[in-house]
Image (spheres, grey):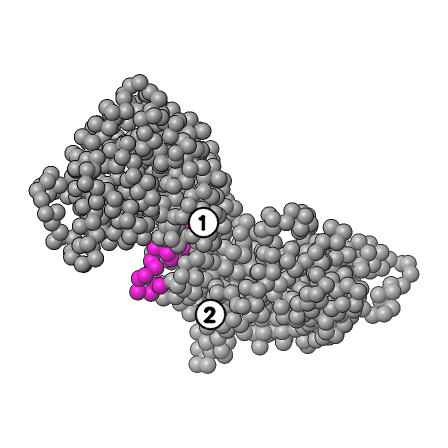
């Protein structure tokens, strides 16, 4: 019995209508995830490296998705059943990449796009991958190279390469290569200068060089020289010594330039202004540079006629321009509160004003169709979209979304939800992003079902995944744990978390074992864990037991007992053990092995007046007593006297007395021959049990949940223990009378009537009143079949239960 509980693309070139959403995975994505979760079925190990099995080939398109899924999932791939493979995969990211090597001229994989910037790879692995896929069109790498071999490998891709992104770019040039381009070099002419290229990629359209130091101007000019079609250049967060490389063909071809986080002087703006073909320009900063002159914005506005997208976030370029005259009165100009953008004939498609000085995003006349900032919902949504790949910006945007969801009415809650989830899944290790995202998610879930918000089951699962992941990655941050627990409480527990049951239980147990956990988290953690242990199958209860949940609850109770504190935490901890031991002998054994009986006696002595505590403790011991091989551990004079005394308890209605009687019923069912104590005697206990049972009103409402009647029905044949038989029959009569819709079908399912029939037909039953209870069970079942409302039921005789008012006890746990 149990207690009753009722493909990443940089934002600069991504159209506004193409943002990734959290739709269910495609068939191809699901197939790739299945592949990664079952690597031993598709791969084999040779010399400590993974290879595809000879008869397997992965087509073009699918190879790209498989690689990207691996990059995202590599930390959560579970290969516990395959020790050798697991050891290889977890050793280095290099090991898995060998799956994409095409050996012995056999083409088993076909990559068009390789996003490797998040992997720890060696130059040899990258070189082998490139040489195995000479049809690569997009390559993203983050690797160090001591001899410049990677540049040579990239050159082999030739005209097929259209996108190339480097992290750690400077380390791809060998010392020898860099020596040729030093200003003071007077040695031999460079072989790279002789052949006129470092990487020959004539059809390259997009180049990214991030978080690195650019080489000398001469070397970088030669690097860019063959890229005669280059349209997009991203130098985010790089150290740029000089912008002289913008001379030449880039002035004719470059349409998109991202200089986020690049320190730009006022003179540098003069050079940028010569790139007259620019449609996209990002000069946003990681922090405001006060020496930038606001007149530079006017220079850009006047010099770049095709400009559609401009990001000046975290700058002072919106400040008033010293000596500027007032706005012109020309009718065709777009009104602008920003002096540097006055005189435009049409508004910008996008203007980034995120965290600009003087709160520019709040101004009334902004010459742009879309604006990033925090002034309203539209700006916050745009900020979440545009800055998904900038953690610092994203954290601030998530805080803005939290305030919006908490205090205002949102018109696009579904879109905000998807963006929050994207952020949390993209940065699982970022405590700041996880805390801000989880705080916002709480208000999304709490408002689910309102006029503007209705989440489908898939999205609700995604929220649960995000919350559990965030809690697991930030166990030492109590703010994150608080946000996570409060959000989980908004779901139907345990039903909605069953798909992630083990992970949720693991996180909660780890949380409850933390030293210095605050009282709120302790309370809500125990409540959630109790909910997860209630109304689930035995396999889940076993799982919880194997994760040392019983031991954790006992430790919590010990601490409460030490402080002489019987509060909700203690009561629910006992309730949790009551639930997790239900029809689970191994967990009952864990309770006894942890000196649970000693803890029971100490709690009983210290808090004898706490009815709910007594009920929960006796409910747990009832589960222990149902296990035949454990009953001998309860056959102790002290324990039996305690159970006997509790038969007279009126705490919590009949619940304490009922549970105590249930414990004794199972112990007595083994017969007088196994009764090994002198006092009280077997017969004394039998008589006292009968007296207690006959005092209980049959219509008593209950705080108990039976998933099976088997433990009760096992007591029916034992005539050598009339009290056990009488207790079982009363329990069935009570449950089918008070809750017929739930328990009459269960009685039929488990052949209860068939097993009661011999007792009903007995001409000389052990007890006449027991037979009356059996007749009531049959009568209740017949009325249930006849669909007679419970309110119209009459027991056909006057007994104590007919005169009693129904007892309202309430639920065991909240």
Q: Secondary structure at mark 1?
A: helix
Of residues 266 and 642, which is closer to you in this image? Answer: 642
In the drawing, does residue 541 fall left or right of residue 812?
A: right
Q: Residue 582: name its quadrant.
A: top left
Q: Residue at x 13, y 41 (%)?
A: 801
Please give the label number shown on residue 687: none
Of residues 292 and 418, which is closer to you in this image? Answer: 418
Q: Secondary structure at mark 2?
A: strand
Instruction: Tell me if residue 282 comes above or below residue 561 in the rendering.
Output: below
In the drawing, does residue 677 fall left or right of residue 497?
A: left
- Residue 115 placed where, x, y %? 65, 62
- Residue 703 placed where, x, y %? 26, 42
Of residues 648 and 113, which is closer to you in this image? Answer: 648
Instruction: Tell me if residue 700 comes above or below residue 455 in the rendering.
Output: above
Decide if residue 695 is in sight here.
yes
> How many C-alpha atoms fall within 10 Å of the one at disc 1: few (<14), some, or many (≥20)?
some
What residue is disc 1 on?
501
Q: Is residue 536 magenta?
A: no
What residue is disc 2 on?
370
Q: Residue at x 41, y 35 (%)?
A: 588
Q: CA distance from mark 2 to mark 1?
A: 42 Å
Which part of the image, by quadrant, shows the N terminus?
top left
- Residue 413 placed where, x, y %? 39, 63
Q: Which residues are magenta?
A: 437-454
Q: Residue at x 89, y 58 (%)?
A: 186
């Amino acid at each position: 019995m149990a207690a009753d509980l009722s493909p990443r693309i940089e934002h600069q070139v991504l159209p506004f209508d193409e943002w990734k959403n959290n739709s269910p995975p495609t068939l191809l994505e699901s197939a790739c995830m299945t592949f990664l979760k079952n690597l031993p079925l598709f791969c084999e190990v040779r010399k400590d490296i993974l290879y595809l099995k000879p008869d397997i080939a992965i087509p073009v398109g699918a190879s790209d998705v498989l690689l990207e899924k691996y990059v995202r999932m590599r930390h959560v791939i579970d290969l516990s059943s395959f020790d050798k493979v697991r050891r290889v995969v977890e050793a280095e990211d290099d090991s898995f990449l060998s799956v994409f090597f095409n050996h012995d001229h056999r083409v088993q994989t076909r990559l068009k796009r390789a996003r490797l910037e998040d992997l720890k790879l060696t130059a040899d692995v990258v070189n082998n991958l490139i040489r195995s896929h000479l049809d690569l069109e997009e390559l993203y790498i983050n690797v160090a190279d001591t001899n410049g071999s990677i540049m040579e490998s990239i050159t082999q891709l030739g005209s097929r390469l259209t996108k190339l992104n480097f992290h750690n770019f400077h380390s791809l040039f060998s010392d020898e290569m860099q020596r040729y381009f030093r200003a003071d070099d007077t040695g031999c002419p460079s072989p790279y200068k002789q052949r006129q290229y470092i990487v020959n990629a004539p059809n390259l359209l997009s180049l990214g060089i991030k978080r690195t130091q650019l080489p000398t101007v001469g070397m970088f000019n030669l690097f860019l020289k063959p890229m005669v079609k280059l349209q997009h250049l991203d130098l985010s967060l790089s150290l740029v010594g000089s912008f002289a490389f913008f001379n030449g063909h880039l002035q004719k071809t470059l349409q998109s330039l991202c200089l986020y986080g690049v320190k730009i002087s006022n003179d540098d703006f003069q050079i940028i202004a010569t790139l007259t073909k620019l449609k996209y320009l990002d000069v946003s900063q990681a922090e405001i540079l006060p020496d930038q002159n606001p007149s530079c914005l006017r220079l850009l506005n006047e010099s770049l006629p095709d400009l559609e997208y401009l990001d000046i976030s975290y700058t002072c370029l919106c400040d008033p321009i010293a000596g500027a005259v007032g706005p012109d009165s020309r009718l065709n100009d777009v009104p602008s509160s920003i002096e540097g953008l006055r005189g435009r004939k049409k508004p910008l498609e996008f203007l980034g004003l995120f965290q600009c000085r003087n709160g520019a995003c709040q101004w009334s006349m902004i010459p742009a169709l879309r604006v990033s900032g925090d002034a309203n919902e539209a700006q916050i949504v745009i900020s979440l979209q545009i800055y998904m790949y900038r953690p610092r910006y994203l954290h601030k945007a998530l805080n803005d979304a939290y305030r919006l969801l908490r205090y205002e009415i949102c018109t696009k809650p579904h879109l905000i939800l998807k963006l929050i989830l994207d952020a949390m899944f993209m940065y699982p290790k970022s405590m700041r992003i996880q805390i801000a995202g989880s705080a916002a998610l709480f208000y999304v879930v709490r408002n689910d079902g309102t006029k503007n918000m209705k989440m489908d089951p898939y999205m609700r699962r995604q929220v649960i995944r995000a919350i559990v992941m965030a809690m697991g990655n930030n166990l030492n941050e109590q703010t994150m744990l608080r946000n996570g627990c409060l959000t989980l409480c908004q779901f139907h527990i345990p039903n909605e978390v069953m798909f992630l049951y083990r992970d949720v239980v693991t996180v909660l147990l780890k949380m409850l074992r933390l030293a210095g956990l605050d009282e709120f988290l302790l309370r809500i953690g125990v409540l959630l864990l109790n909910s997860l242990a209630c109304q689930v199958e035995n396999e889940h209860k076993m799982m919880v037991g194997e994760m040392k949940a019983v031991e954790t609850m006992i430790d919590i109770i010990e601490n409460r007992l030490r402080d002489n504190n019987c509060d909700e935490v203690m009561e629910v901890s006992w309730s949790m053990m009551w639930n997790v031991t239900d029809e689970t002998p191994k967990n009952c054994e864990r309770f006894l092995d942890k000196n649970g009986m000693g803890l029971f006696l100490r709690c009983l002595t210290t808090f004898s007046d706490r009815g709910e505590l007594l009920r929960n403790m006796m409910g747990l011991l009832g589960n222990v007593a149902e296990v035949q091989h454990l009953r001998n551990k309860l056959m102790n004079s002290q324990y039996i006297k305690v159970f006997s005394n509790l038969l007279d308890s009126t705490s919590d209605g009949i619940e304490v007395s009922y549970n105590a009687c249930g414990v004794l019923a199972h112990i007595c069912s083994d017969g007088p021959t196994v009764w090994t104590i002198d006092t009280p005697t077997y017969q004394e206990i039998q008589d006292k049990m009968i007296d207690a049972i006959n005092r209980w009103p049959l219509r008593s409402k209950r705080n108990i949940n039976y998933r099976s009647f088997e433990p009760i029905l096992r007591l029916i044949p034992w005539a050598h223990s009339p009290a056990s038989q009488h207790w079982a029959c009363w329990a069935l009569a009570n449950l089918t009378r008070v809750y017929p819709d739930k328990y009459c079908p269960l009685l039929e399912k488990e052949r209860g009537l068939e097993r009661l029939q011999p007792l009903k037909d007995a001409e000389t039953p052990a007890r006449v009143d027991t037979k009356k209870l059996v007749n009531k069970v049959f009568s209740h079942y017949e009325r249930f079949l006849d669909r007679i409302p419970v309110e119209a039921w009459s027991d056909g005789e006057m007994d104590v239960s007919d005169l009693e008012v129904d007892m309202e006890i309430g639920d065991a746990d909240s």
